[in-house]
C-alpha cells in the first residue's frame, strides 16, 4: 500500500489526531501534545514510505520504525490501527490494566511495534543495531527513528549519533520532532538547546529541515534520505505541539494532560469529528 494523494494522507493524519485524543480522553491519562505534532509524519511513513505489510508484522525484511519518544504512543497506536495491524476497537483499551495498549509501546504485546520504548534517549541506539544488522546481512530494510527535541538532551543520543556515523548507516533516518516544548517548558529555557541542525551536521549526518506538517515536504525529505549514501540522515521536522486543536497548540500544559468533557468536544469539533 502506497498512497500518493496528498489530500488522502492529510485525512489519515487527521484520523490519527482524532483517535489519539479519543484514547487520552477515555483513559483520562496520556500525552496528547506530542502525539498531535507527529501525526503527519506517521501518516507519510506508514502509508507512503515504509516497506511493511500489516498481515506480516514480523517479516524480517520489513522496514522498522522506532518511536523513541514512547510516551507519544497514542499516535503510534492510532496509525497502526488505521493501517490494519489490529482492530480500532482496541484503541478503547488504552492505558487499562487488561489492555495491550499501555502508556508506552510494548513490542511483545502490540502487532506492528518494532521496539519497546519509553525510557528516553535509547531509541537511536536500538535503531543503530537494526540498521547495522540490515547492512551486515544484506537485508535491505530501512530504519526510521523518531526522537523528541527535548529527548535529544540525553547524552546517549549523541553517543548513538557517533556510532551511526562511524558505521555509515545510510539506511538509518532520524526524525526530530522539533516542536520546541518539553514537559518543563521551552527547550531553549530548559537546556539552552539551539542550532539543532548544526549539531546533527557536526555528528556526520545529512541534515534536512522541513515543515513537519507539510505532507509534500515530508515525502520529499524521506525520498532524499533514501538517495543519500555513505551517511545517515537526520530530518529536523519543525512542528507545533498540539497541532490541530486550538487550545493545545504551543501550550506546554498539554504535554501530558487529558481533556475534560468540554475540552474533548471542542477538540472533536475542530478536528471535524463532531
Image (cartoon, rainbow, N blue to C red):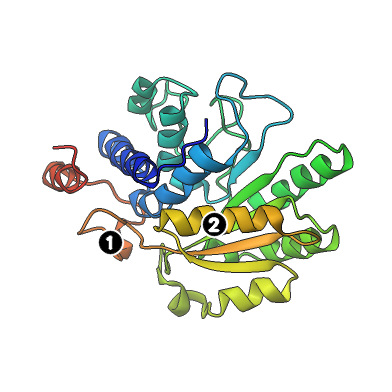
Between the C-alphas of marks 2 and 1, the distance is: 25 Å
Instruction: Return the residue found at the far right.
Output: 136
Pinpoint residue 99: horizontal percent, then vertical percent: 43, 23
Q: In this rendering, is residue 40 above or below 105?
A: below
Q: Are marks 2 and 1 in contact (CB under 8 Å)?
A: no
Q: Quadrant of residue 206?
A: bottom right
Which label belongs to residue 59?
none
Q: Residues within 10 Å of mark 2 (few under 14, many from 20)?
A: few
Q: Which residue is mark 2?
A: 220
Residue visible at 73% across and 71% down in the picture: 203
Q: Which residue is mark 1?
A: 249
User: In the shown orientation, is residue 22 left or right of residue 193?
Assistant: left
In depth, the one of 9 and 212 nearer the eye is 9
Q: Secondary structure at mark 1?
A: loop
Q: Residues within 10 Å of mark 1 (few under 14, many from 20)?
A: some
Residue visible at 37% across and 48% down in the picture: 31
User: In the shown orientation, is residue 78 left or right of residue 173?
Assistant: left
* Mark nearer the viewer, 2 or 1: 2
Q: In this rendering, is residue 211 above or below 242?
A: below
Instruction: Return the residue found at the far left.
Output: 262
Quadrant of the snapshot with the C terminus: top left
In depth, the one of 152 and 143 nearer the eye is 143
Pinpoint residue 29: horizontal percent, then vertical percent: 33, 42
User: In the shown orientation, is residue 157 left or right of residue 211?
Assistant: right
Residue visible at 75% across and 50% down in the picture: 128
Q: In this rendering, is residue 135 above or below 161?
A: above
In depth, the one of 79 and 186 nearer the eye is 79
Q: Quadrant of residue 53?
A: top right
User: In the shown orientation, is residue 32 left or right of residue 153?
Assistant: left
Q: Secondary structure at mark 2?
A: helix
Amino acid at each position: 500500500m502506497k498512497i500518493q494523494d496528498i489530500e488522502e494522507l492529510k485525512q489519515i493524519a487527521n484520523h490519527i489526531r482524532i483517535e489519539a485524543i479519543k484514547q487520552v480522553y477515555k483513559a483520562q491519562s496520556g500525552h496528547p501534545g506530542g502525539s498531535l505534532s507527529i501525526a503527519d509524519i506517521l501518516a507519510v511513513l506508514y502509508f507512503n514510505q515504509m516497506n511493511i505489510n500489516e498481515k506480516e508484522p514480523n517479516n524480517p525484511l520489513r522496514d522498522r520504525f522506532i518511536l523513541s519518544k514512547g510516551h507519544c504512543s497514542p499516535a503510534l497506536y492510532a496509525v497502526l490501527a488505521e493501517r490494519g495491524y489490529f482492530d480500532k476497537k482496541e484503541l478503547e483499551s488504552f492505558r487499562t490494566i487488561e489492555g495491550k495498549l499501555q502508556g508506552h509501546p510494548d513490542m511483545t504485546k502490540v502487532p506492528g511495534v518494532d521496539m519497546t520504548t519509553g525510557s528516553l534517549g535509547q531509541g537511536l541506539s536500538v535503531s543503530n543495531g537494526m540498521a547495522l544488522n540490515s547492512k551486515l546481512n544484506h537485508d535491505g530494510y530501512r530504519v526510521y527513528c523518531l526522537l523528541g527535541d527535548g529527548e535529544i538532551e540525553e547524552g546517549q543520543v549523541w553517543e548513538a549519533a557517533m556510532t551511526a556515523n562511524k558505521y555509515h548507516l545510510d539506511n538509518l533516518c532520524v526524525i526530530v520532532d522539533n516542536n520546541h516544548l518539553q514537559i518543563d517548558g521551552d527547550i531553549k529555557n530548559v537546556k539552552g538547546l539551539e542550532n539543532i541542525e548544526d549539531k546533527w551536521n557536526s555528528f556526520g549526518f545529512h541534515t534536512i529541515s522541513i515543515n513537519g506538517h507539510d505532507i509534500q515536504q515530508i515525502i520529499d525529505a524521506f525520498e532524499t534520505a533514501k538517495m543519500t549514501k555513505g551517511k545517515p540522515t537526520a530530518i529536523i521536522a519543525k512542528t507545533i505541539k498540539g497541532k490541530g486543536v486550538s487550545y493545545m497548540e504551543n501550550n506546554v500544559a498539554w504535554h501530558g494532560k487529558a481533556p475534560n468533557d468540554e475540552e474533548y468536544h471542542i477538540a472533536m469539533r475542530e478536528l471535524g469529528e463532531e
